[in-house]
Image (cartoon, rainbow, N blue to C red):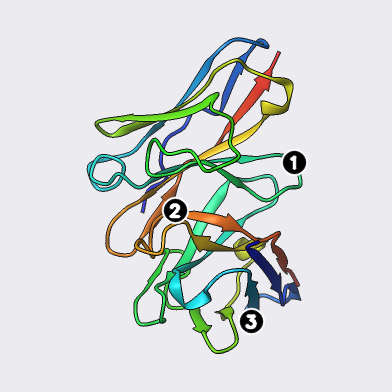
Amino acid sequence: QSALTQPPSASGSPGQSVTISCTGTTSDVGNFNYVSWYQQHPGKAPKVMIYDVTKRPSGVPDRFSGSKSGNTASLTVSGLQAEDEADYYCSSYAGRNNLVFGGGTKLTVL
Amino acid sequence: EVQLVESGGGVVRPGGSLRLSCAASGFTFDGYGMTWVRQAPGKGLEWVSTTNWNGGSTGYADSVKGRFTISRDNTKNSLHLQMNSLRAEDTALYYCARAHDPANDFGPPGYWGQGTLVIVSS
């Protein structure tokens, strides 16, 4: 049950694109298409932005997109806006009724 | 509208016990897996435990296995987490969360409550 690896920080200017990676293993990210991404603003509960690797819940702007290659999943935020500044976490099913989260990435909009 | 409201948090001494509850509404409770996730102050999210739709299958993080027990009462639309032998490192905000997909009880959750705070301190 090792945590998924995310960069601790990422940044971009308004209008730019930024990609956050989430690296796991063949036991989690690499073996299941059950990866979600969450946005968490200070003092708030996490909100799902992407589920099942690429799917976007209704109400989430299409500026948010997800992908996966091998053991690494990625979240891309295009056309950065000030309100995108938050912590982002990935999560993956890890088999045998286990779930695992990434350590989180603090996204700063410059 | 999906609503998840946690309760039962508080201050407890090391070695003590606490029972968290989560009241669910706005969806067919017995159609979804349910999960507890915690977040220590200033830290990231940590999966704690998940139960399938009827409580017949569960999973636990190694850090809580043997000390915490997840359960649910589908007649009352409620989820519980019995926490025993509590340690200082269990101090965290505990979130109740619902599976995103009724066909995937143990996948990453899609809906979250606001959390209940547990502080383990002497």
The residue identified by callout 1 is: A42
The answer to whether B21 is drawn above or below residue A54 in the figure is below
Give B105 or B80, whichever is nearer the viewer: B105
Between disc 3 and disc 1, the foreground one is 1
Query: Under tag 3, what secondary structure?
Result: strand
Are labels 1 and 2 on one chain?
Answer: no
Query: Which three-letter amino acid code belongs to the residue tagged 2?
Result: Pro
The residue type indicated by label 3 comes to Arg
Residue B93 vs A50, above or below: the answer is below
Q: How far apart in space, not on screen, are marks 3 and 1 (Cα)?
A: 26 Å
Residue bearing mark 2: B108
Measured along the vertical axis of the image, is residue A82 above or below residue B100? Answer: above
Chain on which label 1 sits = A
CB-based contact (under 8 Å), mark 2 and mark 3: no
Q: Residue at x 41, y 81 (%)?
A: B55
In which image quadrant can residue B11 be found?
Answer: bottom right
Res. B19 mark: 3
Crowding at dot 1, Cα within 10 Å, few <14 / some 14-19 / many 20+, comes out as few
* Residue closest to the eye, B72 or A26: B72
Element marked by disc 2: loop
Q: Give how far apart the Cα atoms at labels 1 and 2 are.
A: 21 Å
- Residue found 41% across the figure and 75% down from its top: B53
Q: Nearer the viewer, mark 2 or mark 3?
A: 2
